[in-house]
Image (tube, coloured by chain):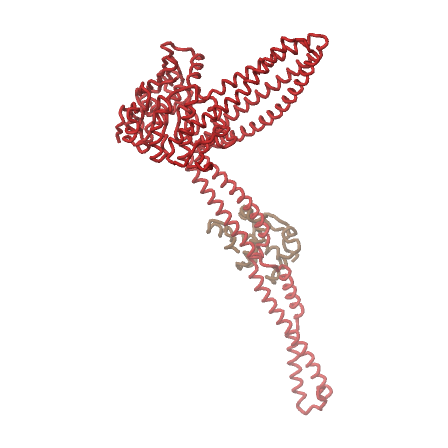
Chain colours: A red, B brown
Amino acid sequence: MLHFNSITLENFGPYKGQQQIEFPEQAGVGIIYGENMRGKTTLLNAIRWALFGEILGRGEREISPEELINWESKEEGNHSFRVTLEFEFEGDDYQLIREYRPKTEGVEPNNAEDYTQDGFLRENGTILGPDEQEQRLNTILPRQISRFFLFDGELLQQYQDLLVDQSEMGEKIRLAIERILGVPVLKNGRTDLRTLLDEAESAVADAASKKAETEELGSQIQATQERVKGHRNEVEKLKSERGNLVDKRNKKRAELENIEGIQTQIERRESIEAEIEQLEERLERKEEKLEDVLSDAWYAALDPVLQDRLEELKDQREKLHQGHIDTQVADELAQRLETASRTGTCPVCDQDLEEGDESHLTDEIKSLRETAETDGGSQGEEYDDVVRAIGSLQDVQRTNPKEQINDVLDDLASIRVDIAAKKDDIDEINQNIDESEAKRATSLRKDEEKLTKKIGIKEDAIDSEQEKLTKAEENLDKLQDKLDRMSDGSFTEEKERRKLYEDLFDIFDKGVSSYRDELRDRVEEDASDIFIELTTEPEYARLEINENYGLTIVHESGDRITVRSSGAEHVVALALMGALQNNAPLKGPIIMDSPFGRLDSGHVRNVVEALPNLTDQVLLLVYRDELDQQEAREILGGQLRKEYSMRRESARHTKLVEGGEIDE
Amino acid sequence: MSDDKTTLGLTPENQDFIDELEPPFGSGLDAARFAMAIAIREGATPGEVSNTNTVWNRGTFDGDGDFRDLVVALYPETNAPYRDIEYFINKGLDMIREHKEESKSLNLQELM
């Protein structure tokens, strides 16, 4: 049983100077009241840091310790902080000190590299060596199961992932659950027996290879055993490598989630950039189109002039044509009048001319000849020039491209406006995001993608190696059967040993499954009992557990409630926590940060009532609206062992005060 | 027309300016033809331009002789259409440049 006695914080986060919380000795509940930003999560982190040397923010992002130095004390020139945790475990007293200080005394640190971190563990007053310290802490509270002791209420919904097959978070929690329940002890035993069985099989093969009649078969078995061993090691190695990659990817994903806002902005920026790229391609195509249509721009500019000139020339041609006809008519008429004058007879009516007509005819002929000469003259050449000019203009005549050019220019202007607007959007995004954070997000995402690819490659390699292993094992079984048949009565001792380990391995192998099933039943039963205590819905009958320890609410009608509220998820997660505590070999304190945020008053009441039954030592970190102080006192009565409040001194300074009276 | 020009040139100023018109025009040739049209439309009367450097021979500018015929159709009294064309090109480029300087940008829609 692990029991916390006290924690002393020195310039850690908002806790300036040295401040201490003494945990009550008796079993029961302690409550620390603190409003937002006073340092509830930081207190939980201080315990985590003391125990594991690392601090995780929400989303499991690792926080650099230098971010946690009290700002005021740093400004005053103090660059160190320290957390001291005192506790008891299995009758021994421990003092765990974790310290973060400048690497070089007297030199002001500027970044994380300028700091050094120390950790000391005193066991009954004696400082343990580094390896021993790590080993001891891992026994007292393994980091992998710490989530069941030190937990953040805001992250309780992660337990919902246990209901989702193959979810990474679900798998992580499942492994942690099995660890707290002690399943790995059996699994380790099975692994050890596998090694012993391999050795026993080798001994049989070795003995066989020394006898003439089984020498060849023995050697074959030895070689196959080597191959099996090689494939098995390779599978293990690949799995471990995949595990490391998955861990790395989870960290990247967690960090990405942490900067989700920036990520969204970056994605928006990238999408706008892609749109700009498309617009620029369209712009380029339009510009090419413009070049094309502008080859006729001269015509667009000249069209009105050409049309006017063409009309003018056509009029001129008409006039010249008319003049030509007038000349021909005058010429013909003059000829007829000359004939009449010469013959004395009118060529039209055949009547004789009268006296005096001749002089009139002479005047008329003169006038007609003058007309013909005036209108005639160079008339033919001028007419040809006009006709040629009309032809020249008609040759170049075409559809006025002005409208088409204008359309293209309008399109171009519109595309340019769109691009400018989108660039403005990008400028706005750039103003809103910290570029270094943005770079970090982009780099994280790239890393995450690379890791996913690598994981895929590893998985393919595992499948392929597993296939080879299976084949080699089948081959080995056949060879061993053959040897057994051939060597009846020989190497009895080796064979007996092999048989013993085979049987033991089978027992452990079955034991793991059977223990898991049994634990699952127990967890299901206990979680159901706790859930019934916690829920305010009388029609809910129980919880049902799945292979991954995911819990589903079952209605009294037998129906499963597949869609549940975040409040219900919270209650189910708390029920699972309680059930795990009941069934875990390791018992210890539970420290909950903001566990009631999503719960209504009925559920809060039920949960508070159930707290003393969860474990001996429960510490709540809550804000005032989350848990009514008077109500908590009434419900818990004598089980409420201690109250603290976080008093604001300044934005960077919180004081821990014993007693639950909260200052504004 | 035997005294007409066989090549067409630009003043140094217009030589620089025509480069600025590419783009939006696909070539200096297209820009020059447009400039010629602008000058004619704006009522420029044929004249002579001095201090030019040859840029095109007339076959390049007017392979089919359409522009020559056009100028002759518009100005029947001319006896050196290519000299007129050269003049109109340079005059038109002057006009476009002035327009550009006044409106701070090249607005083809306004020019057309």
Q: x, y percentage for residue A653?
A: 30, 26
Q: Give the quarter of the image for residue A311.
A: bottom right
Q: Residue at x 57, y 22 (%)?
A: A238
Q: Is residue A415 rendered to the left or right of residue A531?
A: right
Q: x, y percentage for residue A331?
A: 68, 78
A297 or A37, which is in the foreground? A37
Q: Residue furthest front?
A: A557
Q: Up-down: is A212 above or below A385?
A: above
A185 or A510, which is in the foreground? A510
Whether residue A101 is visible = no
Q: Quadrant of the N terminus of chain B?
A: bottom right
Count of labels shown? 0
Q: Residue at x 48, y 37 (%)?
A: A267
Q: x, y percentage for residue A454?
A: 56, 27
Q: Give the quarter of the image for residue A530.
A: top left
Q: x, y percentage for residue A637?
A: 28, 26
A184 or A249, which is in the foreground? A184
Q: Residue at x 70, y 7 (%)?
A: A211
B88 or A443, which is in the foreground? A443
Whether residue A646 is visible = yes
